[in-house]
Amino acid sequence: MKQLTIILLASLLLWSCDPRSRDLPAQFEGRINITAKIINPRDSIGINDTIKIQFESLDTLLYNGSKVHVSYGSNDLTYTSILLRRIDKSFAGAQGPASGSIIFAPVGSLAANKAVLTFQNNGNSMKGEYDIIPKVPGVYFFDQILPGFLSANSGQYKLDTYWNYGNVNRNHQMLIDSAGINSGMALFLQDRVNNGLEVYDFKVK
């Protein structure tokens, strides 16, 4: 119950930082996948090393099985919701804050809570980069807690966005082992998989 409460509170916090424009008209709604790439993925990194995730939404989208060409006007936007967490058994579900980590966006902009990345609008693409520099050893993970959002063609398209890191080791077993058998981490990960949301784990030492 405590873990569920924390997840609900985090979801409400993300919703309150939601930068989408709700009053744009939309002809096409639904969901799409955007490009996401972890640069130089590794099972473990050192303190003060940097992990980068690069996101991109191009001017050709795969919508309902067909390719459609779009542009991004001044009122369009794309963003994604992503949390950096650290295993800490003093918290419900062993999901503690990534205290001390430096989180920044070389491309795009971050909300004050560092959990919503709004992409840079280049007219024919939307790009974002989410970088972290951990300062404390431990086991960390990126959590796509909610779908993101994309609008294109001046709001003609309003779509939920998902992504897939591709063929990389997400280290889920390390996450389960670190959190402990009573944490519910295995169920948490299965729920993310069932909902098409990514979780990527790594160790800092």
Image (spheres, rainbow, N blue to C red):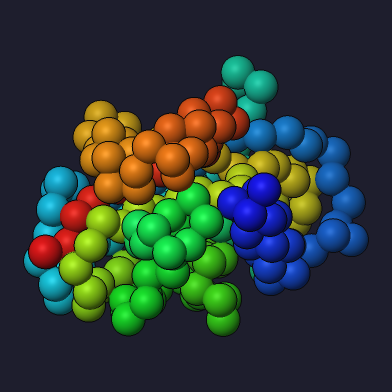
Q: Percent x, y for residue 20?
A: 73, 62
- Relative to 9, 34 lies left or right: left
Q: Is residue 144 above or below residue 50?
A: above
Q: Is residue 195 above or below residue 118?
A: above
Q: Is residue 96 above or below residue 54?
A: below
Front position in the image: 190 or 18: 190
Q: Percent x, y for residue 6?
A: 63, 59
Numbered-mark total: 0
Front position in the image: 79 or 192: 192
Q: Is residue 141 above or below residue 100?
A: above
Front position in the image: 41 or 134: 134
Front position in the image: 17 or 155: 17
The quadrant in which residue 98 appears is: bottom left
Q: Residue at x 53, y 44 (%)?
A: 59
Any part of residue 142 in sight: yes
The quadrant in which residue 77 appears is: bottom right
- Relative to 83, 107 lies left or right: left
Any part of residue 106 in sight: no
The quadrant in which residue 24 appears is: bottom right
- Relative to 27, 6 lies left or right: left
Q: Percent x, y for residue 198?
A: 44, 40
Q: Residue at x 32, y 68 (%)?
A: 131
Q: Residue at x 13, y 53 (%)?
A: 44
Q: Residue at x 19, y 55 (%)?
A: 203
